[in-house]
Image (cartoon, rainbow, N blue to C red):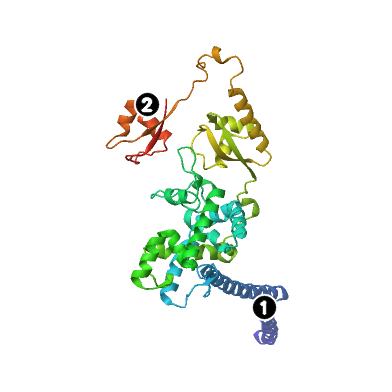
């Protein structure tokens, strides 16, 4: 029986072995769906590798682009003068000032915003005089275009005039008015001063140095050192940096986008549209009342008249700015005030003291004597030391000197 079964079993085993061999071959052969999946996975991996490579290239380009913001051209011109940057010592001085300024992002953005307000005014007056337009960048370095700017040395305004120099160029400086802070009047004075310096030196870098350090100091150093070029002179560190700071300001503001600065037009500060009114007051003039007469706030009036130092003006002649179209309103207000202050015919003998609602404001000017203190002056006139300081724009650190005149209200 076994013998009969063996051929059949052999046949069965043979058939089984053939089937399993075919089945194994079928399993080893990839199906179309699996093949697509494997192909997709391979392509995804390739894309990942390419994306990683692209990201690395972009990061490198960003680094290079960022570094471009910290480099300046090899050739620079300021006020028509080519800066000799091929000299390594001068290149290093320029490099220092440029890097410090271009990295001060908030300051540069404020320059751009304020320039939209003040540069048109300055440029117009530069053109009328036929001077180099680059002079407008002097105001950037001097004050960052802030009319209220004051230095510890006592310089004030956009162009940072000292009181003595301001007086020489007809800038009125009193307890009531400081025209160094008047953008229009101070610009006219600064350009006159720069013209004068150019007539003496005939070289713009030397003119800028003299504007910063003083004409006498620069001329004295030129004679002592026997050199005729700013770039060869040894001057105070602030003055040596001054010309390169102006050049850096010009470089950045001439093309802000090249150095990573960009603002939308609505982000710039609006230029003032103003009228100038020359007025004569017959008595004390309350600036809050002037603002109401012009239909603006007291704050708005003071912001467009930074040269006015107090909340009122005594009798005198003044220059005031008001919004365009408001000039006649101011003139009419002054006329009506003068008319109401004029005594009516036949009533002089019946005039009485003003009511307590509008007390008179008596003004006195005191000349400071040798070794006299604010406390002694305050006691003499029956006022507070604090009031004396406020009336005369004196800080706690300010010292009075013999011959100084102080205004006192009684």
Q: Nearer the viewer, residue 127 or 150?
A: 127
User: Hey, which residue is sitting farthest top in the picture?
Assistant: 350
Labels 2 and 1 touching (C-beta < 8 A): no
Residue 333, by quadrant, is top right
Residue 173 percent coordinates (x, y): 47, 43
Does 15 sit left or right of 127 as displayed?
right
Question: How far apart are the alpha carbons under marks 2 and 1?
Answer: 110 Å
For marks 2 and 1 on the same chain, the one whose residue lies earlier in the sequence: 1
Say if residue 99 shows up in the picture.
Answer: no
Q: Secondary structure at mark 1?
A: helix
**x then y, percent, for residue 139:** 51, 56
Who is closer to the viewer here, 122 or 343?
Answer: 343
Q: Which mark is residue 224?
A: none
Q: Which mark is residue 27?
A: 1
For the N terminus, which image quadrant?
Answer: bottom right
Residue occupying the far left of the picture? 371
Return the residue at label 2: 383
* Other residues around mark 1 within 10 Å, as few (<14) / some (14–19) / many (≥20): few
Q: Is residue 134 left or right of residue 6?
A: left
Residue 378: where, in percent of width, then height? 34, 29
- Which image quadrant for residue 20? bottom right
Decide: few, some or many residues near mark 2? Use Cα within 10 Å; few <14, some 14-19, many ≥20.
some
Q: Secondary structure at mark 2?
A: loop
> On the rendered image, what quadrant is the C terminus found in?
top left
Residue 289 drawn above or below residue 181: above
Question: Which circle, 2 or 1, is nearer the viewer?
Answer: 2
Name the residue located 33 percent from the left edge and 30 percent from the top edge.
377
In the rendering, at what x and y percent does residue 204 appear?
49, 66
Quarter holding residue 46 = bottom right
Q: Residue visible at 52% across and 29% down?
A: 284
Task: Please tell me whether residue 238 is drawn above or below residue 344 in the rendered image.
Answer: below
């Amino acid at each position: 029986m076994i013998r009969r079964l063996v051929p059949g079993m052999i046949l069965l085993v043979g058939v089984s072995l053939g089937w399993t061999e075919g089945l194994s071959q079928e399993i080893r052969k990839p199906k179309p769906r699996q093949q697509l999946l494997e192909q997709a996975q391979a392509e995804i991996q390739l894309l990942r590798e390419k994306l990683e490579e692209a990201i690395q290239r972009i990061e490198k380009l960003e680094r290079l682009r960022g570094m471009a913001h910290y480099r300046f051209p090899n050739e620079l011109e300021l006020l028509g003068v080519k800066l000799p940057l091929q000299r390594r010592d001068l290149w290093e001085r320029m490099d220092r000032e440029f890097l410090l300024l271009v990295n001060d992002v908030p300051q540069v953005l404020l320059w751009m915003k304020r320039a939209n307000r003040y540069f048109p005014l300055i440029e117009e007056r530069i053109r009328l005089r036929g001077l180099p337009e680059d002079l407008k960048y002097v105001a950037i370095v001097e004050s960052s275009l802030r009319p209220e700017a004051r230095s510890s040395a006592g310089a004030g305004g956009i162009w940072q005039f000292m009181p003595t120099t301001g007086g020489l160029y007809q800038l009125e400086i009193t307890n009531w008015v400081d025209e160094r802070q008047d953008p229009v009047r101070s610009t006219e004075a600064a350009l006159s001063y720069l013209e004068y310096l150019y007539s003496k030196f005939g070289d713009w870098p030397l003119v800028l140095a003299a504007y910063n350090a003083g004409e006498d100091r620069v001329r004295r150093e030129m004679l002592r050192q026997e050199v005729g070029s700013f770039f060869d002179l040894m001057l105070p560190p602030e003055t040596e940096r001054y010309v390169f700071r102006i050049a850096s300001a010009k470089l950045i503001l001439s093309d802000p986008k090249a150095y990573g600065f960009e603002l939308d037009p609505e982000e710039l500060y609006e230029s003032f549209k103003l009228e100038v009114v020359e007025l004569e007051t017959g008595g004390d003039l309350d600036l809050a009342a002037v603002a109401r007469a012009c239909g603006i706030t007291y704050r708005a009036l003071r912001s467009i008249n930074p040269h006015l130092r107090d909340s009122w003006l005594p009798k005198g002649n003044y220059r005031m700015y008001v919004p365009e179209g408001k000039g006649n309103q101011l003139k009419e207000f002054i006329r009506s005030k003068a008319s109401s202050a004029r005594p009516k015919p036949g009533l002089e003998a019946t005039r009485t003291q003003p009511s307590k609602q509008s007390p008179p404001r008596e003004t006195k000017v005191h000349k400071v004597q040798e070794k006299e203190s604010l406390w002694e002056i305050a006691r003499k006139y029956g006022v507070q030391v604090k009031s004396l300081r406020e009336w005369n724009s004196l800080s706690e650190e300010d010292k009075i000197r013999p011959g100084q005149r102080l205004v006192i209200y009684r």
